[in-house]
Image: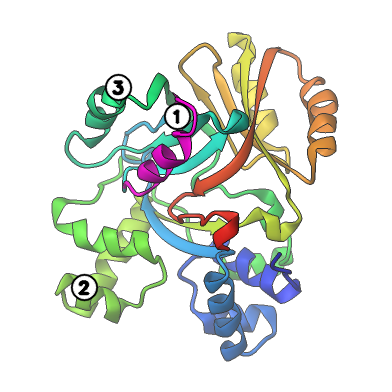
Amino acid sequence: MFNLDQLDRQIIHALIIDGRAPFSHIAAVAGASEQTVARRYRRMCSAGVLRVAALPDARRLGHSDWLVRLQCVPDASAGVAEALARRSDTSWVSLTSGGTEITCVVKPEHGHSRQDLLLRQLPASRRIVAISAQSVLHMFRGGASHWPGATQALTAEQAASLTVPPPAPGPAKGPTPGDRVLLAELARDGRLSYAELAQATHWHESTVRRRVEELRAAGTLYLDVDVDEAAFGIATHANLYLSVAPARLEAVGAALAEHPEVPFVAATTGRSNLTATVLCRDDHALYGYLTERIAGIDGVNAVEVALIIRSVKRAAMLVPPASAA
């Protein structure tokens, strides 16, 4: 297991605030040398603990993500999950329920790739025996709003010095077809230099810088930091599917978003109208969370718990099997 020290945690916290913050700025905030910060960052990336990716914000663009659950025939789920993980329009691919179920997020993309995947490719697979897909109606926490457990290393003053201005209110102008190569490179590595991006896009460096800054200022491009929670002592991951009284949906979603155990919670379509991901130290801590925190929230009528036994892909980072780590 990778052991994080205080400086590692400060670097992660700084990148969550601004994923493209220069190493020199992070070093000044953390009180370390620029070379040390850069070396620590590369070490965490090489170990699979950390990855920064720049991704389009579906909500700002007026699109909806889909939460998909797939039931597979025996021994097929790992292969199907890995095939899904290789797609650019999927994220958060996991094996749950003893390894017989796959969960993933299907993200909107150019053309009809989402409809093609949900309506034609997945139903046609003989290895998949059941599919359910719920549209994300409202996200209370997730996306650019990161897991609180990774954002405790910097003081309020240090964090404020790294904070970037919020996006301008109102309708956001999104990426164009001409941004395709730029977005693909930023999804691969959100910290690529403007010179590297210019080489990939065949644009002038000043053009690349201006376009990235425009997309970030509009809020249509955000920096997502993939973090391996095991490095923070997290051993138990679970998806919760909650049935909540409609009159209490907003209050319950907002309450869960304040829990430090919850990196993601959203209102969805489907039988359960609220979905959350929970990170706990171990199974006993998950039991305590369910019986003390969830049980104490008025309006929750039922909860289905599905343990995540293996993460195959995070927001943008493929996760190797334990045997390959």
Looking at the image, tell me whether mark 1 or mark 2 is earlier in sequence order: 1
- Say left or right for 68 vs 109: right
- Say left or right for 274 vs 148: left
Identify the amino acid type marked 3: Pro
Front-lying residue, 156 or 36: 36
Q: Secondary structure at mark 2?
A: helix
Identify the amino acid type marked 2: Ala
Residue 281 badge: none
Q: Residue at x 21, y 73 (%)?
A: 200
Provide the residue span drawn in magenta: 69-87
Query: Is 45 located above or below residue 181 in the figure?
Result: below
Instruction: Classify mark 2: residues with Cα within 10 Å, few (<14), some (14-19) or many (20+).
Output: few
Quarter the C terminus occupies: bottom right
Q: Which residue is mark 3?
A: 123
Q: Residue at x 67, y 86 (%)?
A: 32
Quarter where residue 82 is shown: top left
Q: Which residue is mark 2?
A: 200
Residue 67 badge: 1
Q: Is residue 286 visible?
A: yes
Q: Is residue 8 magenta?
A: no
